[in-house]
Amino acid sequence: MEIRDLQFFCLTAELGSVTKASEQLQVSQPFVTKVIHQLENELGTKLFDLENRRLKLNENGTYFYKKAREILDKFDRLGVDMAARQEHAQFTTTLLYNNAGYLSALNNAFMEKYPDSVLSEAYAKREDIIEKLNTNQADFAIELPPITGEESRMIETITVLKDTGSIMVPPDHPLYEKEIVTLEELAPYPVIIAPKGSGMRATIDSIFEKHNLRLNVVYETNDMDLQQRMVLVNKKGIAFMSVIHTQDPLIGQYCRKTLTDKCFGTVGLSYNKYRNETESTKLFKKFALEFFGNLQKLANDI
């Protein structure tokens, strides 16, 4: 039994498919099947059942997966720790997200609390987030809306924020003088927003549909800095912001409350529940829960 065998087995379990595992591993499907059969012969037991054309771990397979995952996590963490040691970093955490609204403040808070550590972030579509968490290619993800158990049995998700949201308007805009803006008031104006399939976009679309209103989209981007520039500098429209932006010393003066559904977007913190928890993942999880807990207090007060 080799590390490679455990890697092939765990990836197949996480993806529920030999075909998908072979594609990601860039080896032939028969080779992955052969490795798994050799493992089963060596262990003297079957590890998978076939259910609705999808491989599912049986009782012995589930037990073996947990133990194999612990070994692989320690093996993977060794490489990360050695790299961090050479870079003199306390620890490195990989974080995926599908909504960038919280990233700037989260980054600042993280760097202030852990100045000798690294937070490596990357935008990803929802399906990619699920796959990368399933296969342990990322430590955590912040996504909106939260990942459900129906989407992945490998992932644990904690609801960390129910955001009330706000809108950003330039100072010469008709809505700038208003303290609170209704959906009906903002509906006619051009909107700068994230593309479909991204974070808060699905929630905003559903709210407008619920109220029989049309969203007047003129520009789509996931880049929050670009959204803000399009609103405040180019004055091409208004943009939906997180509640956190109302407290930003630079842009808070341009953000207005919205009078709409109480919850504008629900945010989840997700991770692979079978992955061996390390000191670094414990630290980041505690940090993230405290960060979003403070944000929730802010949202509740507005």
Image (cartoon, grey):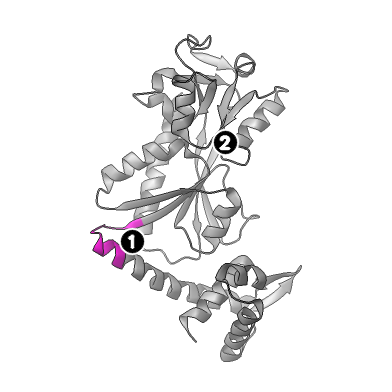
- Which numbered mark, 1 or 2, is in the foreground of this view? 2
Q: Residue furthest right?
A: 52
Left of 132 or right of it: where is 284? left
Q: Badge 1, how many Cα within 10 Å: few under 14, some, many 20+?
A: few
Residue 279 numbered mark, or none: 1
Please name the amino acid that badge 1 sits on: Glu
* x and y, in percent, of residue 200 in the image: 57, 36
Q: Report if residue 44 lies within the magenta region.
A: no
Classify 12 as above or below 87.
Answer: below
* x and y, in percent, of residue 9 in the image: 57, 76
Classify 12 as above or below 296.
Answer: below
Evaluate whether residue 165 shows in this view: no
Q: Residue at x 72, y 74 (%)?
A: 50
Q: Residue furthest front?
A: 234
Q: Residue at x 60, y 20 (%)?
A: 190
Magenta residues span 82-92
The residue where tag 2 is placed is 200
Q: Name the image quarter holding residue 246.
A: top left
Q: Residue at x 44, y 12 (%)?
A: 171
